[in-house]
Image (cartoon, helix red, strand yellow):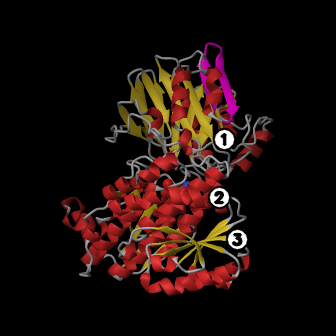
Amino acid sequence: MCGIVGYTGRSAAAPKLLEGLKRLEYRGYDSAGIAVRGEDGFTVYKRMGRVRELAGASTLSGVTGIGHTRWATHGTPSEVNAHPHVYGKFAVVHNGIIENYPELKRECAMRGEVFTSETDSETVAHLLEYYYRGDALAALKQTCARLRGSYALAVMCLDDPDELFGARQKSPLIVGRGEDGLYLASDAPAIAECAELYLLADGEFVRLSGKEVHFYDADGEIFKEPTKFVPEKASPQKGDCPHFMLKEMYEIPTAVAESVVDFESDFRFNEFNRVLCQTEYIQIVACGTAYHSGIAAKYAIEKLARLPVEVTVASEYRYREPIIGQNTLVLAVSQSGETADTIAAAELAKSSGATVVAITNLPNSSLTQTAHFVLYTHAGREVAVAATKSFNAQLALLYSVAIALAKARGQKADISSLLPFPALCRTALTCAEKVKELAPIFAHAKSAYFIGRDVDYCAALEGSLKLKEISYLPSEGYPAGELKHGTLALVEKDTPVVAILTRKALAEKTMNAVSEVYARGGKVLLVTHLGEYAERKEVAAWVPIPACEELFSPILSVIPLQMLAYYTSLARGNDPDKPRNLAKSVTVE
Ligand code: M6R
């Protein structure tokens, strides 16, 4: 999604901005731009496409500037809609959505102001100019008081050549102090060289001036401690892998090993364990892949701990009136910790009296500020837009929570059942060659289906999401028993259907669905450790996976499905790391 970088200091601003924007590329965007304050005012340079298209701006002179990568929400992806937006004495970059922009725009138009873009963001520049009476910070405060929605803003004012201003509301903004200047950024990788970082909270403002950083809230200046969080110094590299997605799949065994936690025997979780003992009801809120890990967790928690679990897509939860009892535990799951809907759902749960646990891969992300407890998946940075290792890591951590909940209730469960999974994942990854051979079947299909029962259904959902997001092939994940209630109508000759089969007790039931597909001419690819079923005539191809503790099998069974999405994407000529229209962290509603 959109990214922000700002710099003011002793060095030329343009190279700093371009380097920062490059480090934000993984978030997904469609255009980019920078504005530098030079002798004669602002010079703005915007381009469609990649940050490298801005190379011509690297020689712009000036030591203060702002830059942006834009992921279009309001207004088509175009050069004119790219940020920064300049109006009067102000240049602005914005992340988020200004929800009341139509009425603000009308107001500006009535004053005779002319807009050059279709964006909601340009209204911010107009309001700044309108409220400006010689004090840019005051104008920014007045402007923000008029905005509804979410924003991280970086602002320059012509009258303050060596200053930058920032504001945050529901969209992250970080201040960095480096050796040669001060920085603003939407996320830490953009300014990894800074020795000191400060996180803005909602409703806060910042003024960077020379060597000084001043923070404010609505009432006046405030003091802020630098954060203890140390961002990674170097950006992740692909190494020998052609794509980040492939590299990240090969990191699954480590991500799983690092994310299993024995809560019961770790004193750092004493307070958390106490909460688990009291918990009577669990709600899980998340989006996309993280939502699927929530569904897998439901199966494990209900079975092991006999506690009711409700899993809701965060964008639905936030506008429902969720029923939260006294001992409700809400698990908010988000790789990035910046997903706007998940954060809003967590905030709602908290304000309604639930104990909120953030499960995230990113220290200091916005979700961590909302929660009572934070549990980290240790998947390492995930660059590819399609989540892979973070899903397996979420499962490892959520299953650890399921085991802890079960033990807290005196049920039989032990963390040792998760320990073989890193090695099993390593074995599962050897499916790559076999899956690569099968990819052309999917690459030439009109659509594909993924079916499974019980925990295999969770893997089916995730396999389907992976395939559609990077291969652009219409696809659905379905409970195997539900297929005949509608979706079977879509199966015709050679329609590929992936059946996941890890629950031995349900194998015959799943095979019924396989037979129904076969009878309509569909081509079944079976993912299972149960070789006896793979030999049946209804099965066109078999991808073996190792046998494992069935309840936790999605950690493994999803691996061939992730691989299948990857190789199908390649076979269709796509870039698996950067699927069209999608962004790595979805910071807007
Ligand atoms: O950062 P989050 O886990 O909150 O992201 C949630 C979804 O946007 C994300 O999982 C998305 O579905 C992935 N691109 C799927 O691969």
Residue 179: name its quadrant.
top left
In the displayed structure, 398 sits above or below 95; it is below
Residue 439: name its quadrant.
bottom right
At mark 1, the secondary structure is: loop
x and y percentages locating residue 316 in the rendered image: 57, 68
Task: Identify residue type, mark 3.
Answer: Asp
Residue at (56%, 39%) from the top-left corner? 25
Q: How far apart are the two marked residues, 3 and 2, measured between alpha carbons? A: 12 Å
Near-viewer residue (88 or 394): 394
Q: Nearer the viewer, mark 3 or mark 1?
A: 3
Q: Residues within 10 Å of mark 3 (few under 14, many from 20)?
A: some
Q: Nearer the viewer, mark 1 or mark 2?
A: 2
In the displayed structure, 563 sits above or below 65; it is below
Residue at (44%, 63%) from the top-left corner? 332
| Dots 3, 1 in contact, CB < 8 A | no
Tag 1 residue: 30
Near-viewer residue (42 or 440): 440
- Asked if residue 247 can be seen in this view, the reply is yes
Tag 3 residue: 494
